[in-house]
Amino acid sequence: MKVFYALMILTLLTVGAAAMPFPHDWGTPGDILHVTIGVVIAVIKVIAVMYIFMHLKFDNPMIRFFVYVPVFLFFVLSFALNFLESWAYVH
Amino acid sequence: MSSALNLAHEPVTKIPHGKLAMWAFLASELMFFSGFFGAFIVLRNANYEIFGQGSAHLSVPMALTNTFILIASSLTMALSIYNLEKGNRGNARLFLGLTILGAFGFLIVKYFEYSAKWHDGLFPHQEGHTVFYSFYFLMTGFHALHVIGGIIPMAYMFFKMSTKKGYDHPVKVEVLGLYWHFVDLMWIFIFPALYLMIPYHTAAGH
């Protein structure tokens, strides 16, 4: 139940953070602060679901390997593309 | 939980075959959605105005409702597996039924969302359609297909549980649960990506 409540609260935090008007002259390219906060909260939620609901915490190391490789590639792709493209857009 | 299972037929991995296969399938599914997200990120940064306007037009309350529904259905799925492993068949059936209801609830909200887009002329080949809506329909459409793909085996297991014989296959329900949690995981990314990450300068009217 704790995970359930945490996921609900984190979802509301995501919506709240997206509505916050961060000044865009903080030296960050574009809306990178919004994106970073959104992605960080999403990652926390994903870890909670995978480790608790999907029992990854208690699972065989082989399964963890199966999971870590695509998840790592997914995040490398998402982060790299987002930051590089945001930077390219601004400059 | 696994210690109670007969794993003699899985001498090498000590993991039920179905579970290992489902994790492999989910890994491939993640890569499938990664392609969408990669293309979305690149095009979003190249079309800030279009994506900002498109995102601002989406209904956050509806998407938020769907997020809550999916999180709650993930919980009920986990509770169904837990109860089946403990031998509480009635509760397992009840929670699986609630999960199915959640899945239908998600699709109903999605239907209203799509209807509004149809009336606003945002579907492909309608005048308001942009590249943002191509991603919107592609990502949410594939996600909705995954929800439908989850309802079918869940309904099968639910009806099997309702019979006199019952359905004493906790591993199969657990494997289905993995799939259902994955559907929730994908929505965790789709929701902020499409509905919330409005390019700041567009949203602020710069």
Image (cartoon, coloured by chain):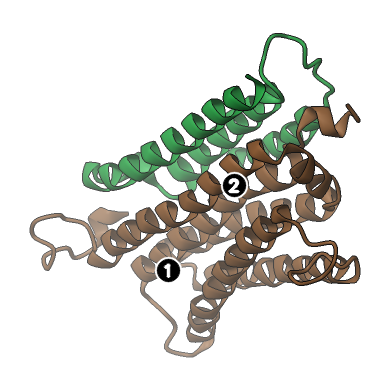
Chain colours: A green, B brown
Q: Which is in the foreground here, disc 2 or disc 1?
A: 2
With respect to residue A63, does B77 lie above or below?
below
Callout 2: chain: B
Q: Which secondary structure, mark 1?
A: helix
Q: Nearer the viewer, residue B9 or B38?
A: B38
Q: Amino acid at mark 1?
A: Val
Q: Residue at x 8, y 60 (%)?
A: B11
Mark identifier at residue B173: 1
Q: Residues within 10 Å of mark 2 (few under 14, many from 20)?
A: many
- Structural distance between the alpha carbons of marks 2 and 1: 34 Å
Report the side of B147 relative to B21 (left or right): right
Q: Residue at x 50, y 37 (%)?
A: A78
Location of mark 2 (residue) = B40
Q: Residues within 10 Å of mark 1 (few under 14, many from 20)?
A: many
Q: Position of residue B81 (x, y in %)?
A: 46, 62
Q: Residue at x 34, y 66 (%)?
A: B171
Instruction: Name the N-terminal-most of marks 2 and 1.
Output: 2
Q: Please identify the quarter of the rendering in which residue B49 is found.
A: top right
Q: Amino acid at mark 2?
A: Phe
Q: Please identify the quarter of the rendering in which residue B115 is found.
A: bottom right
Q: Nearer the viewer, residue B5 or A36?
A: A36
